[in-house]
């Protein structure tokens, strides 16, 4: 959170020898800490779900072999997998030193990511405005001014989504993005910041974002361009050289990372199809954020179209539109950060000292109504305990855990399954899947689809024992994880079952 306020008071006697200053926390430090505490407890209360199994599996593979990790979810080489980022490697080192499992490391990473996110967001808003309540209002807007339908995706920072994705690399990268924007703005505002070392360090920070979460890095670069274009008034050769150094260091950091080639991902369209749904129901998921449009318009009118937030919003919209028009729907992942200029501009405007003119009172009333609508329709279930819930708010996903099955499966042993929850979660406990759930640059997508077809063929009730044996030998499978509707093959031996889901674990292949 932003720096505290140092209050000077008259000093007398011995107190004068110590300066007599007393520290008082800023409003953002107070409310930010309370939010960090409540959100951390809410995150720990919700079972890990969705992509968490993938990220826990990444930690498990790095825990096994830090320098040459295997594919995150299959018994295959992992060279070139973009999941092995600096963030994941740091988690793997921690897992090796502590002996904690991947799931446990993710649970601990959530509050840490939230701290980076909160401090970065607070610092960024303070660069935009010195008004002490602006960061507090920005935090409220960033958490609640989205829409009246759930927007749940990695890289979305609304209150509901954070209960599931707080430990993901995207959350860490967004926190770093706020810090990078804040430091960029500080250098632009500080006329004495002329040394190249600071610009190189800033480039290293952008390079780290690029390696941790490449699609977030695209939005981070767009924001940096908006800040520099908006606030850099004089373009002498030395000035251009310093910003060129920042960009060069960022690219150099990306090029030097040994685990994968981040620039090769630019031409990889294997995940575009799954991101198409990001463009569905946009008014319902993001409409409340448009309450910030009047504030953006006011900024453009008072200064010019070169206002950084105005530029940032315009460039982000172009980026999202490019994703739709080109069919590279992965760029829709930047939709979450596209809302930040709207939310930040609204917060800065409403943090203005009173008395307010009529138009600002109307804007404040509309924003308060939007916050209440967003909280009650989407986000309340994220933080309101079920015992205190008077109306039955929608809640985060409640996924089953698979420790009951993992205790029988050896590390790295192959499991055949197509259950939705099992496919996404079981690899996070250490086993491998015959068919990985997600595309990965370290595995040809055609091979992944062939593996998925083999799994379907094995689980087909019409399959013969001979056909199933071929598939078991092909992938070295040792286990089946079957849904209640799937029959247990005659050659399989049931070992355990889940009381909650009715799923059955059976041993095959010797």
Image: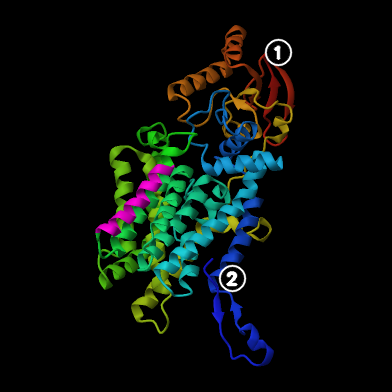
Neighbour class for label 1 at 10 Å: few (<14), some, many (≥20)?
A: few
Q: Is residue 53 above or below residue 243?
A: above
* Residue 481 colored in magenta in the image: no
| Quarter of the image that includes the C terminus | top right
Q: Residue 84, image x and y in percent?
A: 52, 37
Q: Residue 195, image x and y in percent?
A: 39, 60
Q: Residue 467, image x and y in percent?
A: 57, 9
Residue in the picture at 60% in, 61% down: 36
| Sooner in the amino-acid sequence: mark 1 or mark 2 | 2
Q: In the structure shown, which secondary structural element does the residue marked by tag 1 occupy?
A: loop
Q: CA distance from mark 1 to mark 2?
A: 60 Å
Q: Are marks 1 and 2 in contact (CB under 8 Å)?
A: no
* Residue 243 colored in magenta in the image: yes
Residue in the picture at 58% in, 19% down: 459
The residue labelled by disc 1 is: 510
Residue in the picture at 25% in, 61% down: 235
**Numbered mark located on residue 190 in the image:** none
Answer yes or no: is residue 280 visible: no
Q: Quadrant of residue 181?
A: bottom left
Q: Magenta segment, which residues? A: 237-253
Neighbour class for label 2 at 10 Å: few (<14), some, many (≥20)?
A: few
Q: Main secondary structure of the magenta part?
A: helix
Q: In the structure shown, which secondary structural element does the residue marked by tag 2 occupy?
A: helix
Q: Residue 458, image x and y in percent?
A: 57, 16
Residue closest to the eye, 281 or 164: 164
The residue labelled by disc 2 is: 30
Q: Quadrant of residue 455?
A: top right
| Foreground label between 1 and 2 | 2
Answer yes or no: is residue 170 visible: yes
Report whether 288 appears left or right of 453: left
- Colouring chosen for the image of the structure: rainbow
């Amino acid at each position: 959170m932003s720096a505290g306020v140092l209050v000077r008071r008259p000093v007398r006697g011995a107190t004068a020898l110590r300066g007599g200053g007393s520290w008082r926390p800023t409003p953002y430090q107070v409310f930010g800490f309370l939010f960090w505490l409540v959100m951390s407890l809410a995150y720990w209360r919700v079972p890990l779900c969705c992509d968490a199994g993938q990220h826990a599996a990444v930690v498990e593979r790095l825990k096994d072999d830090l320098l040459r990790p295997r594919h995150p979810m299959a018994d295959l080489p992992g060279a070139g997998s973009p999941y092995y980022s600096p963030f994941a490697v740091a988690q793997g080192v921690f897992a090796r030193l502590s002996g904690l499992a991947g799931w446990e490391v993710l649970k601990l990473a959530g509050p840490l990511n939230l701290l980076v996110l909160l401090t970065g967001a607070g610092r960024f808003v303070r660069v935009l405005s010195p008004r002490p309540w602006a960061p507090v209002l920005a935090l409220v807007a960033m958490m609640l001014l989205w829409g009246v339908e759930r927007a749940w995706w990695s890289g979305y920072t609304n209150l509901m989504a954070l209960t599931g994705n707080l430990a993901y690399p995207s959350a860490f990268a967004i926190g770093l993005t706020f810090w990078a924007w804040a430091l960029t703005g500080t250098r632009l505002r500080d006329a004495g910041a002329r040394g190249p070392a600071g610009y190189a360090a800033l480039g290293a920070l952008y390079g780290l974002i690029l390696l941790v979460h490449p699609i977030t890095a695209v939005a981070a670069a767009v924001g940096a361009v908006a800040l520099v274009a908006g606030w850099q008034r004089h373009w002498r050769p030395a000035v251009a050289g310093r910003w060129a150094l920042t960009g060069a260091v960022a690219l150099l950091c990306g090029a030097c990372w040994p685990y994968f080639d981040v620039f090769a991902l630019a031409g990889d369209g294997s995940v575009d199809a799954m991101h198409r749904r990001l463009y569905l129901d946009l008014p319902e998921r993001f409409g409340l954020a448009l309450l910030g449009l009047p504030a953006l318009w006011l900024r453009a009118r008072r200064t010019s179209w070169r206002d950084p937030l105005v530029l940032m919003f315009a460039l982000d919209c172009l980026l999202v539109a490019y994703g739709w028009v080109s069919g590279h729907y992965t760029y829709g992942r930047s939709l979450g950060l596209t809302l930040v200029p709207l939310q930040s501009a609204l917060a800065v405007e409403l943090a203005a000292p009173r008395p307010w003119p009529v138009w600002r009172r109307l804007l404040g009333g509309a924003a308060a109504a939007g916050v209440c609508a967003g909280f009650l329709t989407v986000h309340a279930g994220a933080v309101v305990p079920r015992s205190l819930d008077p109306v039955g708010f929608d809640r985060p996903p409640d996924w089953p855990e698979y420790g009951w099955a993992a205790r029988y499966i050896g590390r790295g042993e192959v499991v055949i399954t197509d259950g939705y929850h099992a496919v996404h979660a079981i690899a996070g406990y250490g086993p491998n899947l015959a068919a990985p759930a997600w595309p990965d640059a370290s595995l040809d997508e055609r091979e992944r689809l062939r593996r998925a077809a083999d799994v379907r063929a094995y689980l087909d009730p019409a399959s013969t024992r001979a056909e199933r044996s071929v598939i078991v030998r092909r992938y070295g499978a040792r286990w089946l994880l079957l849904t209640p509707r799937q029959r247990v093959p005659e050659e399989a031996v049931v070992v355990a079952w889940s009381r909650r889901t009715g799923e059955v674990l059976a041993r095959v292949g010797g």
